[in-house]
Amino acid sequence: MSAHPALSTRFTELTGVKYPIVQTGMGWVSGARLTAATAAAGGLGIIASSTMSLPELETAIRSVKESTDAPFGVNIRSDGSDVGERVDMMIRLGVKVASFALAPKKELLQKLKDAGLVTMPSIGAKRHAEKVAAWGADAVLIQGGEGGGHTGSVPTTLLLPQVVDAVDIPVVAAGGFFDGRGLVAALAYGASAMAMGTRFLLTSDSNVSEQVKAIYLTTDVNGTVVTTAVDGMPHRVLRTELVDKLVKAGPIGRLPRAVRNAVAFQKESGTPWTSMLREGKAMKEGHELGWSQVIMAANTPMLLKASMVDGRADLGLMTSGQVVGLIEDLPSVEELISRIVREAGEVLERLAAPAKQEATPVAAAPKA
């Protein structure tokens, strides 16, 4: 498919992808299948590794590489106890892009850069973008408050121009995007690419169950809520009976469920308790959380798994951006990206049309 020249950006040049479209790393959702489909369609697919064991991550990376020669990325948590091993694996297996769920450690970022990977931290504030840019990050992904999952309060339309003006590296915009108009808008603000999570979750290539997808498709723009009841940090999710119960329960009421989920997550991931406690201590210090909130953080992966993997929307958590209310179908990833590229081209041509008309010489009237 031939794309408009404006869709060739600093980001596409940096990463080698065909189109400036990024599929974000979503826990339990962004596995090998979705990532490979995105990469093959010309976007940047990103494996979410935080819910994978090391062997599972290696299997996922190898699976994507067997499916396509196109570049793709892996999203990691810099505070994970085995993050060094994950970084070594990404280097060894030839992953193109290293994405970070939290701000990376400077030494990890440099190690990845030295190995030839493109480094792209995710941030939610201007000062964080300036910090990682000073460390040498190759690009930065910013998410405005409309986005799903852990999010801030500043809308994309305010955060994006702030960051674009503050750093001289490609900026990827996330939060509220779902179509070609959004891609053009992001580029107009100065971004070099657009990233989407909820829109990619709602495709036929997503492993999420059809029953759960159906709930997303019937949700309107007021159907999400930002709450700290899950893990102590602002988290945008679909409004459900479970979320309402968590909010009403209060910290003491939520604690027993959190402890059960911590035990379940330990069994599921095989992570040693000592490592979980070290990560909890780092989270406590990095985010000024109490120990009860640290325990509550174990809610997130297990509640997400209940919905995204087990299909139990009644027992699980459904992360979502506000844009869910504008999504009405479940195309394949290839159909989605082709549609976005076509729509963006049409918008760009329409915007350029008046200028072309003005530049066209008017034919002289015939002499009498």
Image (cartoon, rainbow, N blue to C red):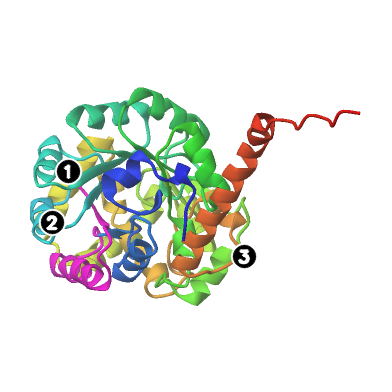
Q: What residue type is labelled 1?
A: Lys
Q: Which of the two discs, 2 and 3, labels the residue nearer the N terminus? A: 2
| Relative to 59, residue 178 above or below | above
* Cα separation between marks 3 and 1: 39 Å
Q: Position of residue 11 (x, y in %)?
A: 33, 43
Return the mark for residue 218.
3
Q: Which amino acid does label 2 sit on?
A: Arg
* Cα separation between marks 2 and 3: 38 Å
| Relative to 14, residue 55 above or below | below
The residue that label 2 is drawn on is: 86
Q: Name the side, left or right, on which 86 lies relative to 180.
A: left
Q: Position of residue 189 (x, y in %)?
A: 49, 32
Does 219 appear in magenta?
Answer: no
The residue that label 1 is drawn on is: 281
Between marks 2 and 1 in the image, the one whose residue lies nearer the viewer: 2
- Residue at the image position 39 percent from the left and 73 percent from the top: 207
